[in-house]
Image: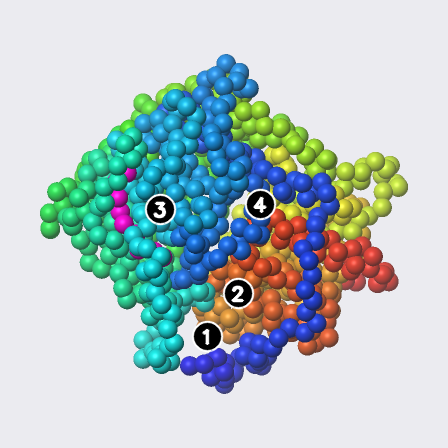
Amino acid sequence: MNHQQRFLQIRSAGVLPQVLFALLVSACVVPLQASTAVRFQSAPPEISEYLRNSSTPILSFNPQRDHMLIYHVKRYSELANLSDRVVRLAGLEINRDNNGPHRANVCLELNIKPMFARDARDVEARFNVPKNSRMSLPTWSPNGKRFAMMRLARKEVSLYLGSTEGRRRLVRVRDVVLNGALGSPIQWLPDGNTLLCRLISRGENDRPVVRLPVGPNVVETSGAEKILRPYRDLLETEEDADLFDYYTTSQLALVNAETEEVVPIGEPDVFLRVLPSPDGQYLLVTRLPRPYSQELPASSFARQVEIWNRDGELVYSFDPIPERINVPPGGVLAAPRNFHWRPTQSAELVWVEPIDLGDPSVQVSHRDRVMRIAAPFQSNKETEITRTEHRYISITWAEEPQIALIKEYDVRTREYRTFLFNPNSDEEPHELIWDGNPIDRYNDPGKPMMRVLPNGQSVMRVHYNSIYLIGKGASPNGDQPFLDTYNLTTRETRRLFQSDLSSHESVVALLAPDASRMITRRETTSSAPNYYVRDDDGELFPLTLFKDEYPGLHDVHRQLITYERRDGVRLSFVVYLPPDFYDQPPDQRQPLPTLLWAYPRSYPNADLASQTRGSLRRFPTYSRATHRFLALMGYAVLDNTTMPVIGNPSTANDTFIEQIVAGAEAAVTKAVELGFADPDRIAVGGHSYGAFMTANLLAHTDLFRAGIARSGAYNRTLTPFGFQNERRSLWEAPNLYTRLSPLMFANQIDEPLLLIHGEADANPATDPVQSKWMYQAIQGNGGTARLVTLPFESHQYQAVESVEHVIWETAQWLDRYVRNAPDRGVPFLEFAP
């Protein structure tokens, strides 16, 4: 059924007539008028320099914690890297020249350093990384003596090896060309000397020939329900499927890191995932068999799960797993899932099966069961380990085989429970140790600390029947990361470490089984993040000496402001003020043009909505938050403005508009009351769901003079089977979808709106056409808008040229319509809804 027929049916069912307008805009996509090609514009020099240089280095510690790699990467890539020839197939972005991922880090420098050097400045050696190479993060061998990286060169993806011993050289492995189309193609086997790789298995001449179609493309439905999201870049023809095979088919091979010998395993195929067993003798293989779906991305294709031996021979096979379609809301696919090796056994495979067919509406005593089968993988030897009353989330295996944690989730209450159990015993009962809401930050017990076994598998640390827990330590004072020990016998928790109120320090790894020595990452408002060894006396030994290279950018004033919504819900924002704001005496300070930046979030109750998020004791950053730069341009920026939507998850969106309006009104009132916001010169902005919020606030309030909406969705009828936390479909709640679509109220948006969108946005809910249609709707109603589309960019902007231009566009828009806006001549309180 076409779009017109669908919406005519909705109309006949009594949907608000504005839906017809959505149809007209959707069906009649006309070329944008008055489009002007402009050159990329630059941000102010100091900001530009910051954006174009390296970010805080990434540290990678080997499993033995005696060496660390220091990986320097560019903060943002260049547009030229994004513009590389790309093929988009089944939701994948593949570089058609090198068969690797389309987007990758640009490595500026790679250094190695022994952990226990006498001085943080000593013995840091640099590897010979090719200049401006796009390199993957390093992957350590289980014995910690070697690491592997892949380099995304222009025509191929090559394998490089480095060592903690001998010369500091990255050595390219000859005759190995990797296939990175379906994720990382390299992983170590337990011996620490052998890599399991996915290699290119064809030649350039094997590329399918594009021919003229012999007929139309046809899809058909015959009454069976099929719920689909609006995915992009799906396969449409048999030629597309052939091209998908061409790029994703690979040859499994074992590569000897010492001799560079390459031993093929089995026949080439499309391998979604391959995992070696803990003893290295078997492979868990997940293949994508044809025919491929034309309605789903590759991540949801039907698949075949098998166990092979190292010679590539099939040892055990599961029933085919169907494509991920018609999964009930809050449910799972009615098939086995979560296949993984049990880390403390030589070759024991574990997986999960739904007892309720994956449907949370089915009444059963237990929803999932956890299964296992061990080598030699004989038929009918599958056994059940345990069952979960609610939906299985995960198992955390401990280094002691009789200890494990299992986590489940109640879809109805949206709460989790974690149990301690013995996976080797059918008689010992499960013991509940934690439960609660996953968004309850104040009562989060933390997550177990892990360690790497000699076989390369990660397991939960256990020390004298206790485990270690690390957490953010959220509180009304902000985050204070902690390290606890939790006794599995007495159920007692003891705090070993917590960051003080002068810094933000978190535990990265333990250097001693009793936690008497540990690696921490510490930063303050004025000092960049650095890594330290902390002993049980509280002394800190620096491992790194990273400095603030751009102190001028960090002279802005930050302050956490709390206030209440009119219904008593406690809210907050972090205000960023220009460096010279406090230079004047209080009675001479002038209120500033202001930008309110927010992202709505759903909460079941007011207490959770009122919890403080983040910490002001962290070093200020601007990556992924470039709106904060406006504080250096004379604006007040209200960042992370709490915008909660509170209520029963099934109906909370019924009051979405009322709640975001109340949240915005409260924030604006508080900022004006404190004297740094000019009530007549305030703008609102947001990214993605925050852009959706922005357009709605302009449509339903007169609080703001302008809006900035980046990569948003504005017509909810185009996401008809749910969005964000909304589970009802368009046909179940037609009035809600219409009421929450700002495009339906474009005639009420009489404030200037800047729309920005990446032209290659692959997020299913935020197709770039959403911004184009919103622009046309405002234009058609005589409003003021500007649409900026960014070439090659996806949902998050990655090219430095794009990021700088977004900063320039934002500043120009706000200067024009906010800073220099004429006085409306109406008291602020009259703008309140």
Residue closest to the eye, 720 or 579 = 579
Q: Is residue 679 visible?
A: no
Decide: is 593 above or below 746. Answer: above
Q: Residue at x 25, y 49 (%)?
A: 285
The residue where tag 3 is placed is 178
Q: Judging from the image, what secondary structure is the residue with disc 3 in?
A: strand
Marking on residue 76:
4
Find the distance from the CA under tag 4 to the CA under tag 3. Answer: 25 Å
Q: Nearer the viewer, mark 1 or mark 4?
A: 4
Q: Nearer the viewer, mark 4 or mark 3?
A: 3
Residue 380: % across, % down:
11, 51
Q: Judging from the image, what secondary structure is the residue with disc 2 in?
A: loop
For label 4, the crowd category at 10 Å Cα-Cα, with few meaning under 14, some 14 to 19 and many 20 or more, is: many
Amino acid type for the residue under numbered disc 2: Asp
What is the quadrant of the C terminus in the image? bottom right
- Whether the magenta-drawn stretch holds residue 376 is answered as no
Find the distance from the CA under tag 2 to the CA under tag 3. Answer: 32 Å
Q: Residue at x 46, y 73 (%)?
A: 732
Find the distance from the CA under tag 4 to the CA under tag 2. Answer: 23 Å
The residue where tag 1 is placed is 731
Amino acid type for the residue under numbered disc 4: Tyr
Amino acid type for the residue under numbered disc 1: Trp
Amino acid type for the residue under numbered disc 3: Leu
- Tell me where the magenta segment starts and ends, as one range: 247-255
- Mark 4 or 3, nearer chain start: 4
Find the distance from the CA under tag 1 to the CA under tag 3. Answer: 47 Å
Find the distance from the CA under tag 2 to the CA under tag 1. Answer: 21 Å
Decide: is 335 above or below 71. Answer: below
- Mark 2 or 3, nearer chain start: 3
Q: Judging from the image, what secondary structure is the residue with disc 4 in?
A: loop
Q: Is residue 257 left or right of residue 783?
A: left
